[in-house]
Every structure is written in C-alpha cells, then in structure tokens.
Image: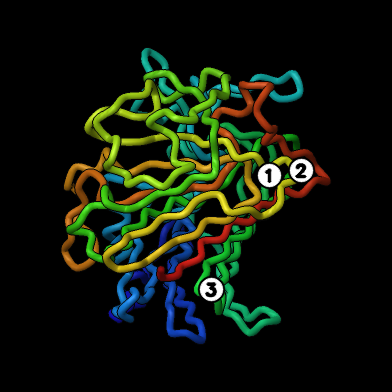
Amino acid sequence: MELLREENFRGSIKGKDVKLFTLQNKNGCAAQFTNYGARWLSMWTPDKNNRWADVVLGFESLDEYLAAKEKYYSAIVGRVCGRINKGTFELGGVKYELTKNDIFGTPVKNHLHGGFDGFSFHVWNGRILLNNRGEEVLELIYFSKDTEEGYPGNLEVKVTYTLGNDNSVSIHYSAYTDKATIVNLTNHAYFNLHGDMNRNVLDHLVYINSEKSVECDEELIPTGNIIPIKNTPLDFTRPQTIGARIDQSFTGQLFPGKGYVVSYVLDNPGKTLQLAATLEEKETGRVIELYTDQPGVQFYNAWLFDGTDVGKQGQRYFSSSGVALEAQGLPDAPNHRKFPSIGLLPGEVYQQTTIYRFLTS
C-alpha cells in the first residue's frame, strides 16, 4: 500500500494552507483526502484474493491537481452541481445571473458545477475526529460569501467523510444560509475497480435502481421532462456492463461510441437512505454499493478523458478510465417546477448523506 505523501500536498492557496488527511479503519483500509476542494484522493481496498489497490482516480501531488485538464477529480462540487441553463434562475421573484463556464452551450454558455471558482477550488478548514464507534472522521468546513459566482446568501457548508469499519466511506453534507438560495452538493469521484487505471471500466457491471431519467437536449440541458427508460439502452435495473450498449444512442444521455451522461431519478419520496446503485468488477471481485437519500444519481463513464491527464503511478487517463456515480438533486432544478426543490431558506438546514460501501463478491 503506497499512500500519498503529506509533503506533496503542502501548499498555500489564497493564503490558506493545503493539507493531506489520512483515515484508516480496523480492517486496514485507508482513504486519503485534501482540504483543497474537500477532495477524496484515494481508497485502498482488497480484492477477493486480498490484493490491495487504490480504486480512486487522481494524482500524487497538489500541483498535479492544480494543472489537470479535468478540474473536478473527487472534489465536493457546489454551490450547485451540474448545469444551470444559460446560468440564470429565479428565486422569490428575483432573477439571478451566475457565471457561465460550461464548454457546452451556444450561443449562451451554461453554469456548471458552481462556476469558475466554485467549492472545488477553495481550501476548506479541516480536522480529524473520532465518532462514538471509534471510526475516524474528517470534518471540512467552508464559508461561501454572498454573491460568490452569482449565488445569493452567505452559506456555511460542512462536509464529513467517515471511514467505517464496514469498509464504507460515508459523506454527510450540511449547510446554512442567511438569505434564500439554492444548494445541491455532490462528490465527483471517479472509480476504477481494477485498481489499474491502464485498464478501462467498460467491463464493470452496473446496477442502477431507477426506471426514469431526466430528459436532456444535445447540450445536456434538461428539458423539464422525467421520462421512462425501462427496456431502453439506459436501463440498468438488470445489471449490464458499461460497454455492452455503448454503441447505441439516446439523445442527450448516451453518445454512440463514447458513453453515458445520465441523471437517473430515484423513487425516494421519504428521503431515506436506500441502495441506489452497485458497481462490480468480476475479475477482482470488487464491488461498490451506493446508498443515498437524494432524488438522483448522475452516471458518467468519463468519455471526455483524452489522455492529457497523467495520474498516480504515471497512469494516463483515457476515455472510460473511470466511472462516476454521483448522488445529488436533479440538474437545473430551479428552472423546472416539477423537479424536487433545491431551495434553502434562512433557518432551514440542507442535509444529505451518501455512502459508498466497498466489498468483494
């Protein structure tokens, strides 16, 4: 097990110190994080033959994260993840203009993942704690000022990562505001259960507990419709490999020869933790179970990766080097009344819990 080195993550951004944090459990699993973007850097887990590997894509130093073409490796994404059409929304009768940073969008760009300087690019305050089960917890706090990237309200955000003794990483999010605003947070980790990122994830078996998705146009912007997908190329209620139907097409969600970018809608009216998805690699026997209380899961097999980024151990990241399963609210929610609200008012608490459990079959 070659853990990332603390000295490679020492630095200062906007006058705040960047640090590396390491959590370990009683089984020997290790997860590492940095307070730059509250990022989850590594996850060491065994395969069915007790061979250990890191299954999270990323880099060996802060400088490499800063220079990467893909900007969101394992970051906490906010104030709102995903796209907001034309970077505008209305709240309480007031129209807000956000920064427009999406590579898609013509002639007007969209707002993506919190903007040019969203949560993923700030240094959070961090400390390691123990919970009442003796498990190690990383607590990270960020204060987002009113009008940051165009969002209204001062927002205090806390994210905790807990490395459980059941080999899970539990992510709990909370936020408070002093003015009506919108919040939709997620973690943007990419996984490869081979533990060898020179091999792609097209052979990974996927189950997603959903028969509906958010319909999108060719620029990945929701139309406002939630559509049935049973018995379509997007249907993973019967486990399929990522590559099995990759040459098929589904407008705005499955691009032939490239892959998926789908917002799956979960049937979760009570906002209770439920099994939303599983990811399995047969050769190693590694499995991830994803549990969440959120209404949606974004599924993306990193088909925009082009080999520019060179990650840990010199492994170059090409199309489908990893897969993201991101629990979150539905994209562009403020512009679609039928979608669950992501609004947050003073006196309310935004809360979300998502758990990635690592096991072997």
Q: Nearer the viewer, residue 34 or 173?
A: 173
Tell me if residue 7 can be seen.
no
Whether 185 is drawn above or below 106: the answer is below
Question: Mark 1, residues whose alpha carbon is within 10 Å: few (<14), some, or many (≥20)?
Answer: some
Residue at the spot 38% in from the left edge and 74% down from the top edge: 45
Question: Mark 3, residues whose alpha carbon is within 10 Å: few (<14), some, or many (≥20)?
Answer: many
The residue at the far right in this view is: 347
Which badge, 2 or 3, comes first in the chain's sequence? 3
Q: Which mark is residue 163?
A: 3
**Mark 2 and 1 residues: CB-CB less than 8 Å, in contact?**
yes
Which badge, 3 or 1, comes first in the chain's sequence? 1
Instruction: Give percent across and percent down for residue 94.
Output: 71, 20
Quadrant the N terminus occupies: bottom left
Tell me if residue 221 can be seen.
yes
Amino acid found under the numbered disc labelled 2? Asp
Q: Residue 154 carries which label?
A: 1
Amino acid found under the numbered disc labelled 3? Leu
How was this image coloured? rainbow
Amino acid found under the numbered disc labelled 1? Asn
Compute the Cα span from label 3 to label 1.
Answer: 30 Å
Residue position for label 2:
178
Q: Is mark 2 on a helix, strand or loop?
A: loop
Could you tell whether 334 is left or right of 208 in the image? right
Residue at the spot 17% in from the left edge and 55% down from the top edge: 316
Marks 3, 1: nearer the viewer: 3
